[in-house]
Image: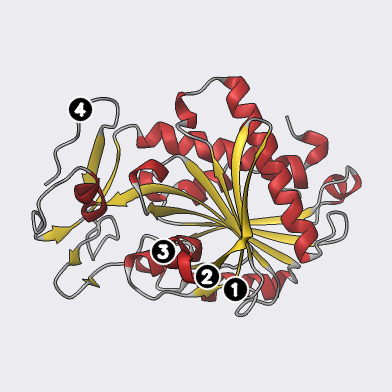
């Protein structure tokens, strides 16, 4: 399988079985995935096709609160931000607080872009992914950290936004497509905005667990693993969609290429993650949850 490089970049590999949704196998010859439960943002697809979608004039990089941020406008007018956090789970409170502040500001900018009103709008926050797999549990872990008031009169009077939270799970667990699940719930609640949070597969080693990506283009559940999954975007949902992801895994083929492994070294592709994935996932779940709470649950946010 994969031998970890020396130093701190230790990694662990896992497979996802068809029956349980806990692993992933790929036929590299046909590029067909036999199980595709690990959800993946459309913006990660964008990373592989970015040269055709991003115009030089629409791309810029800047620093906010000490955090490097890349911003691009895509074909069709969608916006795409990448916050370069580095190995945030190894950093102290000062660095983490600056990352929280930067992420909060970027998210507020997206609310303005989509025309969402904090005091009168309804937001549905969706944590995508398999809660039983640490590398894919980012979305559900964020949900567990959110302060939710819903329609409760006390929270509304305190200034909370009317926010609802759902853990979508994966189709192998429920038999329900992720996009279908979200669409039905958004219609039922009369949501004015959907926010999705998910784990993703990194395009490069340097992005693995080192960036947070945000877009209003939407997400395609399962697309990163080849399923062509449900599109979750303003085109398919009853309201605008803002998608957030952190690349928590990387494909073995990408890793092998980065470390100079001979072509054809692997008969099957698999996903690899840092051995500290539990700490990493908790760190980014805290980061994103804090930003969301500070916006929608400001009176009680720490």
Tell me how far mark 4 sits from mark 2, CA to CA: 36 Å
Tell me how far mark 3 sits from mark 2, CA to CA: 29 Å
Secondary structure type for disc 2: helix
Q: Dot 3 corresponds to which residue?
A: 170
Task: Pinpoint residue 140: horizontal percent, then vertical percent.
Answer: 50, 50
Q: Dot 2 corresponds to which residue?
A: 53
Which residue occupies 48% across, 35% down? 282
Secondary structure type for disc 3: loop
Which residue occupies 34% across, 32% down? 276
Q: Nearer the viewer, mark 1 or mark 3?
A: 1
Of the numbered discs 1 and 3, the one sitting upstream in the chain is 1
Secondary structure type for disc 4: loop
Name the residue nearer the viewer: 82 or 136. Answer: 82
Q: Residue furthest front?
A: 57
Tell me how far mark 2 sits from mark 1, CA to CA: 5 Å
Task: Pinpoint residue 234: horizontal percent, then vertical percent.
Answer: 65, 74
Q: Dot 1 corresponds to which residue?
A: 75
Q: How is the image coloured?
A: secondary structure
Task: Pinpoint residue 36: horizontal percent, then vertical percent.
Answer: 32, 67
Q: Dot 4 corresponds to which residue?
A: 6
Q: Is residue 83 visible?
A: yes
């Amino acid at each position: 399988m994969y031998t970890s490089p020396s130093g701190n970049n230790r990694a662990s590999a896992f497979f996802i079985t068809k029956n349980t949704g806990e692993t992933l196998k790929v036929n590299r010859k046909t590029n067909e995935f036999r199980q595709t439960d690990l959800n993946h943002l459309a913006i990660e697809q964008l990373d592989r096709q970015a040269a055709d979608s991003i115009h030089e004039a629409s791309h810029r990089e800047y620093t906010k609160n000490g955090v490097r941020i890349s911003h691009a406008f895509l074909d069709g007018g969608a916006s795409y931000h990448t916050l370069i956090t580095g190995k945030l789970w190894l950093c102290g409170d000062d660095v983490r607080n600056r990352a929280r502040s930067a992420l909060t500001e970027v998210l507020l900018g997206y609310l303005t872009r989509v025309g969402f009103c904090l005091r009168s709008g309804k937001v549905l926050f969706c944590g995508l992914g398999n809660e039983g797999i640490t590398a894919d549990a980012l979305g559900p872990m964020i949900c567990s950290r959110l302060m939710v008031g819903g329609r409760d009169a006390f929270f509304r009077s305190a200034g909370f936004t009317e926010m609802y939270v759902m853990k979508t799970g994966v189709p192998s667990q429920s038999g329900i497509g992720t996009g279908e699940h979200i669409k039905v719930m958004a219609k039922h609640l009369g949501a004015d905005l959907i926010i999705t949070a998910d784990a993703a597969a990194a395009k490069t080693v340097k992005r693995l667990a080192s960036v947070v990506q945000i877009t209003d283009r939407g997400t395609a559940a399962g697309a990163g693993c080849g399923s062509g999954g449900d599109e979750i975007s303003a085109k398919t949902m009853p309201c605008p969609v803002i998608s957030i992801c952190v690349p928590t895994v990387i494909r073995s083929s990408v890793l092998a290429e980065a470390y100079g492994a001979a072509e054809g070294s692997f008969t099957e592709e698999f996903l690899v993650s840092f051995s500290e994935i539990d700490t990493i996932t908790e760190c980014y779940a805290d980061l994103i949850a804090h930003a969301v709470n500070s916006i929608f649950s400001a009176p009680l946010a720490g």
